[in-house]
Image (spheres, rainbow, N blue to C red):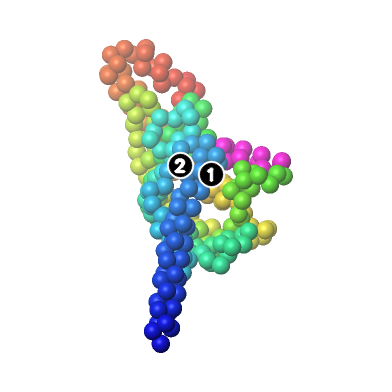
């Protein structure tokens, strides 16, 4: 009887230990994947604060995901995602296509920085399009071409309570204004084919964000912000010519 009891205790300890190991491994794996493949896709710094995965329920939460700007832009980041929740089918992790029930990105802060060559968001989208396009044309099976290997099918993806910071005049006395963006909801991503790579998903999200951001910027007096930045830069520099030269090209003037 005692032997059976001891065996039962050992089995229970092994199960608990296995679950703890799986929990810690998934957290490390997800964070490593985000910070490894994110910069390859966006050509910018990508940092993830924390990951909390529940292997049994298939629920996960991510916090403090920061996507930096491409080269040439001066604001601290393009996206700061405070909280992200994910619900998935745990069994699908063992297959080539991960089934994700829902992704909710809540209250992200998005920065739209206007520079001489366009916006930082447009530059990010071009980088992602170049990444996914290169993989499609080459037809290679490399991690870079296949978006880190696995494909995903997402039933529902929602981006809600977004704030857009519109910044003009960097690197001088930058002027900015903040507006709210409409919620984004996308369904059945990757269902028509054999799933979508995470790079494809990022591209689709960026397309929607850029579309909403463009509409928001169209309703803001961006030229007025640039003019205000120019005047403050003139005062700070004490030389009108130097300040105007630094701001020249923001609007092609």
Q: Tell me if residue 210 comes above or below residue 168 in the rendering.
A: below
What residue sits right under mark 2 in the picture? 46
Tag shown at residue 89: none
Whether residue 87 is visible: yes
The answer to whether residue 88 is above or below residue 160 is below
Give neighbour class at mark 1: few <14, some 14-19, many 20+ (Cα, 10 Å): some
Q: Which residue is mark 1?
A: 37
Magenta includes 136?
Answer: yes
What separation in Å lies between label 1 and label 2 (alpha carbons)?
9 Å
Most frequent secondary structure within the magenta stretch: helix
Relative to the observer, which residue lies in front, 160 or 143? 143
| 209 horizontally vs 235: left or right | right
Picture quadrant of residue 79? top left
Residue 37 shown in magenta: no
19 and 148: which is toward the camera? 19
Q: Is residue 157 left or right of residue 221?
A: right
The segment highlighted magenta reads: 126-138
Total numbered labels: 2
Dots 1, 2 in contact, CB < 8 A: no
Q: Residue shown at 49%/41% (left/top)?
A: 214
Residue 37 is situated, as x and y percent measured from the top left of the image, at 53, 44
Q: Nearer the viewer, residue 119 or 182?
A: 119
At label 2, counting other C-alpha atoms closer than 10 Å, the crowd grade (few under 14, some 14-19, many 20 or more) is many
Q: Position of residue 157 (x, y in %)?
A: 50, 58
Give the mark, 1 or 2, whose residue is nearer the N terminus: 1
- Give me the residue at 61% from left, 51% from top: 149
Is residue 187 visible from the viewing direction of this image? no
Left or right: where 63 falls relative to 212: left
Most foreground residue, 20 or 113: 20
Q: Residue furthest bottom?
A: 1
- Measured from the top left, where is residue 12 in percent x and y? 42, 74
């Amino acid at each position: 009887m005692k032997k059976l009891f001891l065996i039962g205790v050992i089995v229970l300890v092994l199960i608990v230990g296995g679950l703890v190991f799986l929990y810690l491994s998934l957290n490390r794996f997800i964070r490593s994947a985000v910070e490894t493949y994110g910069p390859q896709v966006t050509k910018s710094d990508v940092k993830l604060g924390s990951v909390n995965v529940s292997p049994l329920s298939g629920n996960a939460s991510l916090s403090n995901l920061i996507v930096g700007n491409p080269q040439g832009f001066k604001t601290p980041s393009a996206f700061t995602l405070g909280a992200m929740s994910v619900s998935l089918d745990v069994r699908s992790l063992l297959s080539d296509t991960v089934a994700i029930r829902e992704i909710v990105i809540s209250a992200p802060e998005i920065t739209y920085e206007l520079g001489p060559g366009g916006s930082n968001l447009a530059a990010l989208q071009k980088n992602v399009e170049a990444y996914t396009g290169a993989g499609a044309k080459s037809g290679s099976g490399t991690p870079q071409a296949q978006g880190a290997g696995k494909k995903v099918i997402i039933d529902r993806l929602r981006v809600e309570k977004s704030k857009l910071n519109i910044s003009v005049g960097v690197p001088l006395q930058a002027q900015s204004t903040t507006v709210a963006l409409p919620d984004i909801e996308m369904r059945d991503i990757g269902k028509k084919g054999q799933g979508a790579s995470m790079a494809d998903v990022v591209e689709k999200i960026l397309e929607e964000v850029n579309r909403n951001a463009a509409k928001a910027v169209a309703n803001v007096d961006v030229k007025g912000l640039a003019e205000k930045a120019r005047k403050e830069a003139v005062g700070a520099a004490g030389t009108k010519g130097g300040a105007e030269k630094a701001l020249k090209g923001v609007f092609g003037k």
